[in-house]
Image (spheres, helix red, strand yellow):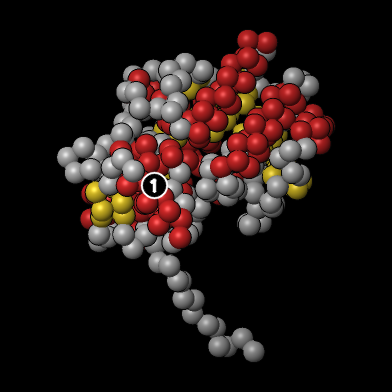
Amino acid sequence: MRIAIVGMGGDIGTGVALRFDKDRETSMLGIDMEPPRRRIRRAIFHRVDPADVEERTRLLVDFDPEFIIHAGIYEPHSRSNPHDAEIRTRAATRSVFRAARGCPSLRQIVMRSSTDVYGRSNVGANPQAVLGTDLQPHSRFGQMMADAEDVAVDFSKQRPDIGVTALRFAPIVGPYIPSPLGRYLRLPFVPTGPLFFEGKFQLVHIDDVHEAFVAAVRARAGGAFNIAGEGTVRGSEAARIGRRPFIPTWGPGWLVARAATAMFGAPLSEHSIESLTHGQAVSTEAAKRELSFVPAHSTRECIEDLYNWESVVRLEVDRSVA
Protein backbone atom coordinates (compact mmCIF):
# COMPACT_ATOMS: atom_id res chain seq x y z
CA MET A 1 0.00 0.00 0.00
CA ARG A 2 1.39 3.38 -1.01
CA ILE A 3 0.29 6.35 1.10
CA ALA A 4 1.20 10.00 0.62
CA ILE A 5 0.78 12.22 3.66
CA VAL A 6 0.67 15.95 3.00
CA GLY A 7 1.43 17.65 6.30
CA MET A 8 3.52 14.79 7.71
CA GLY A 9 5.63 17.17 9.80
CA GLY A 10 2.71 18.27 11.96
CA ASP A 11 1.32 16.47 15.00
CA ILE A 12 -1.55 14.97 13.00
CA GLY A 13 0.51 13.84 10.02
CA THR A 14 3.29 12.40 12.16
CA GLY A 15 0.88 10.45 14.35
CA VAL A 16 -0.93 8.99 11.35
CA ALA A 17 2.38 8.04 9.71
CA LEU A 18 3.54 6.25 12.86
CA ARG A 19 0.44 4.08 12.81
CA PHE A 20 0.96 3.05 9.20
CA ASP A 21 4.69 2.64 9.85
CA LYS A 22 3.93 -0.64 11.63
CA ASP A 23 2.70 -2.24 8.39
CA ARG A 24 5.54 -3.88 6.45
CA GLU A 25 3.51 -3.76 3.24
CA THR A 26 3.18 0.03 3.37
CA SER A 27 5.45 2.65 1.84
CA MET A 28 4.92 6.35 2.46
CA LEU A 29 5.74 9.73 0.98
CA GLY A 30 5.74 12.69 3.36
CA ILE A 31 5.53 16.36 2.38
CA ASP A 32 5.56 19.36 4.68
CA MET A 33 7.37 22.61 5.42
CA GLU A 34 8.91 21.03 8.54
CA PRO A 35 10.18 17.46 9.05
CA PRO A 36 8.43 15.08 11.46
CA ARG A 37 9.91 15.02 14.95
CA ARG A 38 9.82 11.24 15.08
CA ARG A 39 11.62 8.63 13.04
CA ILE A 40 9.35 7.09 10.40
CA ARG A 41 11.20 4.21 8.79
CA ARG A 42 8.85 3.45 5.92
CA ALA A 43 8.57 7.03 4.70
CA ILE A 44 10.53 9.21 2.30
CA PHE A 45 10.15 12.81 3.43
CA HIS A 46 10.48 15.95 1.33
CA ARG A 47 10.65 19.39 2.91
CA VAL A 48 8.71 21.69 0.59
CA ASP A 49 7.13 25.06 1.22
CA PRO A 50 3.31 24.90 1.00
CA ALA A 51 3.35 27.73 -1.54
CA ASP A 52 5.42 25.62 -3.96
CA VAL A 53 2.41 23.95 -5.55
CA GLU A 54 4.36 22.79 -8.61
CA GLU A 55 6.99 20.85 -6.61
CA ARG A 56 4.41 19.29 -4.32
CA THR A 57 2.32 18.24 -7.29
CA ARG A 58 5.36 16.72 -9.03
CA LEU A 59 6.35 14.70 -5.97
CA LEU A 60 2.85 13.30 -5.53
CA VAL A 61 2.48 12.36 -9.20
CA ASP A 62 5.90 10.69 -9.29
CA PHE A 63 5.05 8.64 -6.18
CA ASP A 64 1.64 7.66 -7.59
CA PRO A 65 0.00 6.81 -4.24
CA GLU A 66 -3.01 4.63 -3.70
CA PHE A 67 -4.13 6.88 -0.84
CA ILE A 68 -3.50 10.55 -0.10
CA ILE A 69 -3.96 11.85 3.43
CA HIS A 70 -4.38 15.61 3.37
CA ALA A 71 -3.35 16.78 6.83
CA GLY A 72 -1.74 19.92 5.41
CA ILE A 73 -4.28 22.17 7.09
CA TYR A 74 -2.84 25.11 9.00
CA GLU A 75 -5.15 26.20 11.80
CA PRO A 76 -4.87 29.89 12.75
CA HIS A 77 -2.69 30.40 15.83
CA SER A 78 -1.54 26.77 15.77
CA ARG A 79 1.67 26.60 13.72
CA SER A 80 0.90 29.71 11.67
CA ASN A 81 -0.62 33.15 12.09
CA PRO A 82 -4.10 33.53 10.53
CA HIS A 83 -2.87 35.11 7.30
CA ASP A 84 -0.15 32.52 6.63
CA ALA A 85 -2.44 29.69 7.74
CA GLU A 86 -4.99 30.61 5.09
CA ILE A 87 -2.44 30.94 2.29
CA ARG A 88 -0.67 27.69 3.20
CA THR A 89 -3.89 25.73 3.55
CA ARG A 90 -5.20 26.94 0.19
CA ALA A 91 -1.92 26.11 -1.57
CA ALA A 92 -1.62 22.66 0.04
CA THR A 93 -5.20 21.79 -0.90
CA ARG A 94 -4.65 22.94 -4.47
CA SER A 95 -1.53 20.77 -4.80
CA VAL A 96 -3.31 17.67 -3.44
CA PHE A 97 -6.24 17.81 -5.83
CA ARG A 98 -4.17 18.93 -8.80
CA ALA A 99 -1.81 16.00 -8.31
CA ALA A 100 -4.70 13.58 -7.79
CA ARG A 101 -5.70 14.00 -11.44
CA GLY A 102 -2.33 12.63 -12.51
CA CYS A 103 -2.11 9.61 -10.17
CA PRO A 104 -3.46 6.53 -12.00
CA SER A 105 -3.24 4.29 -8.91
CA LEU A 106 -5.09 6.67 -6.58
CA ARG A 107 -8.14 5.20 -4.87
CA GLN A 108 -9.01 7.65 -2.12
CA ILE A 109 -8.23 11.04 -0.58
CA VAL A 110 -8.83 11.54 3.15
CA MET A 111 -8.72 15.18 4.21
CA ARG A 112 -8.90 17.08 7.45
CA SER A 113 -11.89 19.37 7.87
CA SER A 114 -13.58 20.88 10.91
CA THR A 115 -16.94 21.20 12.61
CA ASP A 116 -16.32 24.96 12.28
CA VAL A 117 -17.84 24.67 8.80
CA TYR A 118 -21.25 24.61 10.55
CA GLY A 119 -20.72 28.02 12.11
CA ARG A 120 -23.35 28.83 14.69
CA SER A 121 -26.00 26.56 13.18
CA ASN A 122 -27.05 23.19 14.56
CA VAL A 123 -26.97 21.34 11.22
CA GLY A 124 -23.99 19.34 12.48
CA ALA A 125 -26.42 17.45 14.70
CA ASN A 126 -27.82 15.71 11.62
CA PRO A 127 -26.92 11.99 11.66
CA GLN A 128 -25.64 12.08 8.07
CA ALA A 129 -23.31 14.73 6.62
CA VAL A 130 -22.58 15.15 2.92
CA LEU A 131 -19.33 16.49 1.51
CA GLY A 132 -19.65 20.16 0.64
CA THR A 133 -23.10 20.60 2.22
CA ASP A 134 -24.34 22.30 5.42
CA LEU A 135 -21.50 24.81 5.14
CA GLN A 136 -22.43 27.91 7.11
CA PRO A 137 -19.09 29.15 8.49
CA HIS A 138 -18.80 32.36 10.49
CA SER A 139 -15.11 32.20 11.43
CA ARG A 140 -12.03 32.47 9.27
CA PHE A 141 -11.02 28.87 9.97
CA GLY A 142 -14.52 27.65 9.21
CA GLN A 143 -14.42 29.45 5.86
CA MET A 144 -10.98 27.95 5.12
CA MET A 145 -12.36 24.46 5.68
CA ALA A 146 -15.48 25.19 3.64
CA ASP A 147 -13.29 26.38 0.76
CA ALA A 148 -11.20 23.19 1.00
CA GLU A 149 -14.36 21.05 0.87
CA ASP A 150 -15.56 23.01 -2.16
CA VAL A 151 -12.33 22.07 -3.96
CA ALA A 152 -12.94 18.44 -2.99
CA VAL A 153 -16.52 18.56 -4.34
CA ASP A 154 -15.35 19.96 -7.69
CA PHE A 155 -12.74 17.20 -7.90
CA SER A 156 -15.31 14.50 -7.09
CA LYS A 157 -17.53 15.66 -9.93
CA GLN A 158 -14.65 15.30 -12.37
CA ARG A 159 -13.26 12.06 -10.91
CA PRO A 160 -16.11 10.10 -9.33
CA ASP A 161 -13.91 6.99 -9.48
CA ILE A 162 -11.71 8.37 -6.66
CA GLY A 163 -13.28 8.50 -3.21
CA VAL A 164 -12.98 11.67 -1.15
CA THR A 165 -13.48 11.59 2.62
CA ALA A 166 -13.61 14.72 4.77
CA LEU A 167 -13.19 14.25 8.52
CA ARG A 168 -14.86 17.17 10.27
CA PHE A 169 -13.07 17.30 13.61
CA ALA A 170 -14.25 19.08 16.72
CA PRO A 171 -11.53 21.31 18.26
CA ILE A 172 -8.46 19.11 18.63
CA VAL A 173 -6.63 19.02 21.97
CA GLY A 174 -3.98 16.90 23.61
CA PRO A 175 -0.68 17.11 25.44
CA TYR A 176 2.25 18.65 23.62
CA ILE A 177 0.35 19.83 20.53
CA PRO A 178 -0.09 23.49 19.46
CA SER A 179 -3.87 23.55 19.90
CA PRO A 180 -5.19 27.12 20.11
CA LEU A 181 -8.13 26.19 22.34
CA GLY A 182 -6.06 23.76 24.42
CA ARG A 183 -3.34 26.35 24.98
CA TYR A 184 -6.01 28.87 25.95
CA LEU A 185 -7.74 26.62 28.47
CA ARG A 186 -4.42 26.05 30.27
CA LEU A 187 -3.94 29.75 31.00
CA PRO A 188 -3.89 30.83 34.67
CA PHE A 189 -7.32 32.41 34.05
CA VAL A 190 -9.95 31.57 31.44
CA PRO A 191 -12.35 34.15 29.91
CA THR A 192 -15.59 32.35 29.08
CA GLY A 193 -19.00 33.22 27.72
CA PRO A 194 -21.54 34.99 29.96
CA LEU A 195 -22.96 32.85 32.75
CA PHE A 196 -26.12 30.92 31.83
CA PHE A 197 -25.53 31.75 28.15
CA GLU A 198 -22.38 29.76 27.45
CA GLY A 199 -22.29 27.43 24.52
CA LYS A 200 -21.73 23.69 24.94
CA PHE A 201 -18.96 22.32 22.76
CA GLN A 202 -17.21 19.04 22.06
CA LEU A 203 -13.52 18.23 21.78
CA VAL A 204 -11.54 15.43 20.17
CA HIS A 205 -8.28 13.99 21.46
CA ILE A 206 -5.24 14.01 19.18
CA ASP A 207 -4.88 10.21 19.54
CA ASP A 208 -8.44 9.77 18.26
CA VAL A 209 -7.65 12.07 15.33
CA HIS A 210 -4.85 9.72 14.28
CA GLU A 211 -7.09 6.67 14.59
CA ALA A 212 -9.88 8.34 12.64
CA PHE A 213 -7.61 8.80 9.61
CA VAL A 214 -6.58 5.15 9.79
CA ALA A 215 -10.22 4.05 10.05
CA ALA A 216 -11.18 6.21 7.05
CA VAL A 217 -8.44 4.67 4.89
CA ARG A 218 -9.51 1.16 5.86
CA ALA A 219 -13.24 1.80 5.38
CA ARG A 220 -12.85 3.64 2.06
CA ALA A 221 -16.20 5.34 2.59
CA GLY A 222 -16.58 8.65 0.78
CA GLY A 223 -18.39 11.64 2.25
CA ALA A 224 -18.14 13.88 5.29
CA PHE A 225 -17.98 12.54 8.85
CA ASN A 226 -18.09 14.32 12.19
CA ILE A 227 -15.40 13.22 14.64
CA ALA A 228 -15.88 14.34 18.25
CA GLY A 229 -15.65 12.96 21.76
CA GLU A 230 -18.83 11.93 23.53
CA GLY A 231 -20.51 14.58 25.65
CA THR A 232 -20.23 18.35 25.80
CA VAL A 233 -18.65 20.88 28.14
CA ARG A 234 -18.94 24.61 28.80
CA GLY A 235 -15.93 26.88 29.11
CA SER A 236 -16.58 27.50 32.81
CA GLU A 237 -16.85 23.74 33.43
CA ALA A 238 -13.52 23.16 31.68
CA ALA A 239 -11.92 25.88 33.81
CA ARG A 240 -13.29 24.30 37.00
CA ILE A 241 -11.89 20.90 36.02
CA GLY A 242 -8.49 22.55 35.63
CA ARG A 243 -8.95 24.60 38.84
CA ARG A 244 -8.68 27.82 36.90
CA PRO A 245 -10.61 30.98 37.71
CA PHE A 246 -12.92 31.92 34.86
CA ILE A 247 -14.08 35.37 33.82
CA PRO A 248 -17.55 35.72 32.23
CA THR A 249 -17.05 37.78 29.08
CA TRP A 250 -19.33 39.23 26.44
CA GLY A 251 -19.41 41.86 23.71
CA PRO A 252 -16.41 44.22 23.64
CA GLY A 253 -14.93 42.31 26.58
CA TRP A 254 -13.62 39.74 24.11
CA LEU A 255 -11.35 42.39 22.60
CA VAL A 256 -9.72 42.83 26.00
CA ALA A 257 -9.62 39.06 26.52
CA ARG A 258 -7.91 38.50 23.16
CA ALA A 259 -5.28 41.12 23.93
CA ALA A 260 -4.64 39.70 27.40
CA THR A 261 -4.43 36.07 26.32
CA ALA A 262 -2.08 36.98 23.46
CA MET A 263 0.27 38.55 26.02
CA PHE A 264 0.28 35.22 27.87
CA GLY A 265 1.25 33.34 24.70
CA ALA A 266 -2.18 31.93 23.87
CA PRO A 267 -3.70 34.03 21.06
CA LEU A 268 -7.44 33.47 20.95
CA SER A 269 -8.77 32.86 17.46
CA GLU A 270 -12.29 33.75 16.41
CA HIS A 271 -13.29 30.11 15.90
CA SER A 272 -12.28 29.37 19.51
CA ILE A 273 -14.40 32.29 20.73
CA GLU A 274 -17.26 30.85 18.67
CA SER A 275 -16.91 27.52 20.50
CA LEU A 276 -16.85 29.22 23.91
CA THR A 277 -19.82 31.49 23.26
CA HIS A 278 -22.12 29.68 20.83
CA GLY A 279 -20.88 26.11 21.23
CA GLN A 280 -21.17 23.28 18.72
CA ALA A 281 -22.55 19.78 19.24
CA VAL A 282 -22.51 17.32 16.36
CA SER A 283 -23.72 13.83 15.59
CA THR A 284 -21.05 11.16 15.13
CA GLU A 285 -23.46 8.39 14.11
CA ALA A 286 -22.24 8.31 10.49
CA ALA A 287 -18.61 7.75 11.54
CA LYS A 288 -19.69 4.97 13.87
CA ARG A 289 -21.80 3.29 11.21
CA GLU A 290 -19.70 3.72 8.06
CA LEU A 291 -16.14 4.04 9.39
CA SER A 292 -16.63 1.73 12.37
CA PHE A 293 -14.98 4.45 14.43
CA VAL A 294 -15.81 5.70 17.91
CA PRO A 295 -13.37 8.04 19.73
CA ALA A 296 -11.77 6.44 22.77
CA HIS A 297 -11.82 9.72 24.72
CA SER A 298 -14.92 11.64 25.80
CA THR A 299 -14.91 15.43 25.78
CA ARG A 300 -14.49 15.49 29.55
CA GLU A 301 -11.56 13.05 29.32
CA CYS A 302 -9.98 15.36 26.73
CA ILE A 303 -10.18 18.21 29.27
CA GLU A 304 -8.80 16.08 32.10
CA ASP A 305 -5.90 14.88 29.96
CA LEU A 306 -5.17 18.46 28.95
CA TYR A 307 -4.87 19.60 32.57
CA ASN A 308 -2.97 16.50 33.70
CA TRP A 309 -0.21 17.30 31.22
CA GLU A 310 2.84 18.47 33.15
CA SER A 311 4.48 21.66 31.89
CA VAL A 312 7.89 20.29 32.81
CA VAL A 313 8.73 16.62 32.46
CA ARG A 314 11.68 15.48 34.58
CA LEU A 315 13.63 12.52 33.25
CA GLU A 316 15.67 10.20 35.41
CA VAL A 317 19.39 10.31 34.70
CA ASP A 318 21.10 7.00 34.08
CA ARG A 319 24.30 7.54 36.08
CA SER A 320 25.68 4.15 35.05
CA VAL A 321 26.45 5.57 31.60
CA ALA A 322 29.82 7.31 31.68
Residue 39: image quadrant is bottom right
The residue depicted at 59 percent of the width and 16 percent of the height is: 153
Residue 157 rendering spot, x and y as whole percentages = 63, 10
Circle 1 is placed at which residue position? Answer: 255
Residue 260 visible to an observer of this rendering: yes
Nearest the eye: 184 or 18:
184
**SS at mark 1 in the image:** helix
Task: Judge from the rendering whether residue 222 lies leftward or rightward of residue 61; answer left or right.
Answer: left
Q: Specify the quadrant that holds the C terminus.
A: bottom right
Nearest the eye: 156 or 294:
156
Residue 195: image quadrant is top left
Task: Judge from the rendering whether residue 303 lies leftward or rightward of residue 207; answer left or right.
Answer: left
The residue depicted at 69 percent of the width and 52 percent of the height is: 35
Instruction: Answer few, some or many: residues within 10 Å of disc 1's Cα (few below 14, many 20 plus, some between 14 and 19).
Output: few
The residue depicted at 58 percent of the width and 26 percent of the height is: 148
The residue depicted at 62 percent of the width and 24 percent of the height is: 108
Seen in the picture, residue 128 relative to 68 is either above or below; the reply is above
Residue 123 rendering spot, x and y as whole percentages = 35, 20
Residue 290 visible to an observer of this rendering: no
Residue 228 rendering spot, x and y as whole percentages = 38, 36
